[in-house]
Image (cartoon, rainbow, N blue to C red):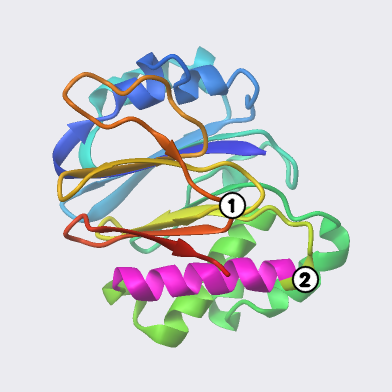
Amino acid sequence: MCRLFGSRTRQPGRVSHELFHGANALRVQSREHPDGWGLGWYENGAPRVVRSLTPAHGDQEFEKLSHYVSAQTVLAHVRKASVGRVAQENTHPFQRGAWLFAHNGTVPDWDKVRGPLEALIDPSLREALHGETDSERCFLLFLSRLRRRCSPDEADAESAAVALAETAAAVRQIAAEASTTFLATDGRVMVACRRGRTLFVSSADGEYVAIASEEPGEPPPGGQRAWRLLAEDALVAVDPDLRLSVSSLL
């Protein structure tokens, strides 16, 4: 189990409330999810990722970045290890090219299902595996499915959402009890799905969309909207113009 947060905004914005200051910010959530943290954001279209094995609530670097980062697209994660050691290569978000990916959940019976899941990944991506987690393999499966529809470097929100839905379905076919709450972005589009874990969204048309596995607390100052809980099996897509679409995995 883990916790995740992502946002896209019209203008570069800070996320210190959601990461650090909020009543249930990721810093607070990391007390129960202490096995490392990761923060990704985009500068001039290129992703920057910082990851640490120190619990976020006790890491000065996490505090520093929480206040420093101001970007149109941000993805953050705190980890409670289930599959894979507490190690840098197993820490979210995972990155391939422009894409970042985070997972809240677990694929059970990992020793049994790891082989069948890896077999679904494009061989060229399978060779690039760095760590031991179910989450990284779900990410590479997502990119494999996305490649079937378009170039990942030019993906639109609809194609990315379909690829994410196909990923969740494929994982569930292998491991019926898997929890597959995913969040992915390439800095232009952002997609997420809820299955087996909670997922919340806060949005204002054309201005910002924020997605979180738990409510970070009261909305920050500045007129942002209250968080709302999405239904189980929700599928979320945010396009480059910050248009939000919520449909179903089913």
How packed mark 1 is, by other alpha carbons closer than 10 Å (few <14, some 14-19, many 20 or more), is some
Residue 70 percent coordinates (x, y): 20, 33
Q: Which residue is mark 2?
A: 174
When the figure is inspected, residue 185 is found, relative to residue 208, above or below; the finding is: below
Quick one: 156 or 122, which is closer to the camera?
Answer: 156
Measuring 38% from the left and 33% from the top, which residue is drawn there? Answer: 227
Q: Which residue is mark 1?
A: 232
Check if mark 2's residue and mark 1's residue have beta carbons within 8 Å: no
For the N terminus, the image quarter is top right
Q: Seen in the image, is 104 located left or right of residue 235?
A: right
Q: Is residue 50 visible?
A: no
Q: Which residues are magenta?
A: 156-172
Tell me the CA gap for discs 2 and 1. 20 Å
> Left or right of 244: which side holds 61?
right
| Residue 113 coordinates in the image, percent (x, y) | 82, 66
Residue 98 in sight in this render = yes
Q: Residue, x 75% and y 41% (percent of image)?
A: 82
Is residue 114 placed above or below 23 in the rendered structure?
below
On screen, 188 above or below 124? above
Magenta stretch containing residue 10, yes or no?
no
Q: Position of residue 226 (x, y in %)?
A: 33, 30
Q: Closer to the observer: label 2 or label 1?
A: 1
Question: What is the quadrant of residue 159 in the picture?
Answer: bottom left
Give the quarter of the image for residue 202.
top left
